[in-house]
Image: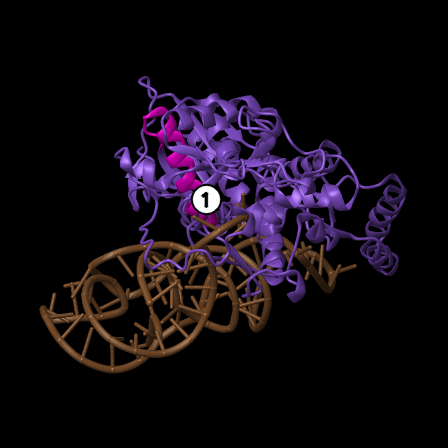
Chain colours: A purple, B brown
RNA sequence: GGCGGGGUAGCCAAGUGGUAAGGCAGGGCUCUGCAAAAGCCUCAUCCGUCGGUUCGAUUCCGACCCUCGCCUCCA
């Protein structure tokens, strides 16, 4: 089954085929976090999207190398290191750890490699030297090294592969920092920033003098040194299209003379309660904020995966509550199948898997994919209610679910293990019901509810669920 | 100003030149001693507005209205 993806380079949906002549190995690079604070829900949308792409590639049988960089040197980081009188590794380390904890809580598979910018200074310097040698980069009087768009174009390269650029119509310069006036042309961007007093201890020696890497260069250096000069997929948030990704292409192709990336995928941003997220509006959420409201990582993951990645998504608290209910419906169905299958092994029911895969392979139509899941849930529940589902069918359905869950990554509901102090109450209630002492039985039910547990009576006995 | 997305039920969100998936919420019912975030059923004569093409348009074309994003270090 062909996997079709929207490639920003062609602005169209194309069938994916890896560079690997054996059609097996896939190199994928995703722009990772800048570790100066906790990642917010908007950042997470992009990382969950990247995780979905990776899982779908793996589902389609590819052997993926997933690389995600950690940007651990950058203006905001340096500013905070100075303000908090700490050191760079100490400061970035705490947020990197928090990031990886959150990534796991959201059910994302860990990238195979997580290169840090500060650990790739030699590769960055080598890349800049190559660009200087080819005359595409220049050192300005202030000591910084810049990339020259004019020289690059003069070599026959195309600048503006990911979007239509019209420099004359651009409102250029409005946000250019004053410390970059040394550039020959307004469109040029920094490869190496010369050391300034405010940088404190954050600098590295280089052939161009003490300083630190520019933003774009780290991604070019790390991606090509790990995945090769040309690789399959590069993803990131839509805001990175320009200038970050465009500049990555310029630096990389300018240095190697080879095509940089075959497929560029960009995830759209999200709104929160219909508005652009901002701290002053009170609609700025980190994963931790949502966890404090009682939601789990998998519920947040489900919500982030409920809309197509190229559409702006409206993240709402109401939607999150809905995500919780929807997930509970799936969990309930799967739990019942488990009970019936009782460990029987069977091959996956092809109907569900095929429909699901067909939806996702069409440029990640996740909504249609969920549609197949919920139709399956309803069909299964109906059969379950009629008692018409055979043990082998239940096992086969369960196997299919496990297969597609490898892509969805929502895992299993946390097992509601009753705390020991409640066990006595549950047994007491069971006896009370047997003796038709419903007054006592209802009292216990209320008591359990007050402690956050719902008890459900079924012909097979009581079931306890965490509220 | 340039470039690019969107406007589908109370909310979220797919989709198609032939008459609108799915989820949440709501309503009805079933199981139950009573219940249940348990299960089933139901819920858009209609897809921003106005024109055009067509046997037929929400889907194609044009205009307009509204909205969001990018335009040099923001996922």
> Farthest front residue?
A141
From this view, report whether residue A117 is shown above or below residue A240. above
> In the structure shown, which secondary structural element does the residue marked by tag 1 occupy?
loop
> Residue A48, image x and y in percent?
54, 42
Give x and y (percent) for residue B13: 45, 57
Residue lying at the far top of the rendered structure? A22
Q: Say whether residue A44 is left or right of residue A431.
A: left
Q: Residue at x 62, y 44 (%)?
A: A75
Chain letter, disc 1 residue: A
Q: Is residue A36 magenta?
A: no
Quadrant for the N terminus of chain A in the image: top left
Is residue A216 visible in the rendered structure shown here? yes
Q: Can residue A352 be seen at all in this image of the molecule?
A: no
Image label count: 1
Q: Is residue A409 above or below residue B21?
A: above
**Magenta segment boundaries in residue numbering:** A238-261
């Amino acid at each position: 089954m062909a996997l079709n993806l929207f490639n920003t380079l062609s602005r169209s949906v194309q069938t994916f085929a890896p560079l690997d002549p054996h059609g097996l190995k896939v190199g994928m690079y995703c722009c990772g976090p800048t570790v100066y604070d906790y990642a917010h829900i908007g950042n997470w949308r992009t990382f969950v999207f990247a995780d979905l792409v990776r899982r779908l590639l793996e589902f389609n049988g590819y052997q993926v190398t997933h690389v995600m960089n950690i940007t651990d040197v950058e203006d905001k980081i340096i500013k905070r290191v100075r303000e908090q009188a700490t050191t760079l590794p100490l400061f970035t380390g705490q947020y990197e750890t928090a990031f990886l904890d959150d990534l796991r809580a959201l059910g994302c598979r860990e990238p195979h490699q997580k290169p840090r910018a500060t650990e790739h200074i030699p590769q960055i310097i080598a890349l800049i030297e190559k660009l200087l040698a080819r005359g595409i980069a220049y050192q300005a009087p202030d000591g910084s090294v810049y990339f020259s768009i004019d020289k690059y174009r003069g070599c026959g390269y195309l600048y503006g592969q990911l979007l239509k650029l019209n420099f004359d119509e651009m409102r250029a310069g409005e946000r250019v920092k004053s410390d970059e006036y040394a550039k020959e042309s307004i469109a040029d961007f920094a490869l190496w920033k010369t050391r300034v007093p405010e940088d404190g201890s954050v600098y590295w020696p280089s052939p161009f003098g003490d300083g630190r890497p520019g933003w774009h260069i780290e991604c070019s250096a790390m991606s090509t040194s790990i995945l090769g000069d040309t690789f399959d997929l590069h993803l990131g948030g839509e805001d990175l299209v320009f200038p970050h990704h465009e500049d990555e292409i310029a630096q990389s192709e300018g240095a190697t003379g080879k095509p940089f990336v075959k497929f560029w995928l960009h995830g759209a941003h999200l709104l929160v309660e219909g508005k652009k997220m901002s701290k002053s509006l009170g609609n700025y959420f980190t994963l931790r904020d949502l966890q404090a409201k009682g939601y789990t990582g998998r519920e947040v993951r489900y919500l982030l995966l409920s809309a197509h990645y190229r559409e702006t998504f409206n993240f709402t608290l109401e939607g999150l509550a809905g995500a919780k209910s929807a997930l509970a419906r799936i969990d309930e169905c799967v739990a019942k199948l488990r009970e019936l299958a009782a460990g029987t092994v069977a091959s996956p029911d092809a109907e569900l898997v095929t429909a699901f895969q067909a939806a996702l392979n069409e440029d990640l139509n996740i909504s249609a994919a969920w549609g197949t899941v919920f139709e399956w849930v309803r069909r299964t529940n109906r059969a379950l209610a009629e008692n018409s589902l055979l043990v082998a069918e239940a096992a086969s359905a369960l196997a299919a679910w496990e297969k597609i869950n490898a892509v969805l990554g929502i895992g299993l509901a946390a097992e509601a293990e009753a705390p020991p102090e409640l066990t006595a109450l549950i047994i007491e209630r069971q006896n009370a019901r047997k003796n038709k002492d419903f007054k006592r039985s209802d009292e216990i039910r209320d008591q359990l509810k007050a402690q956050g547990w719902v008890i459900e009576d079924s012909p097979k006995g009581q079931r306890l669920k965490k509220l």
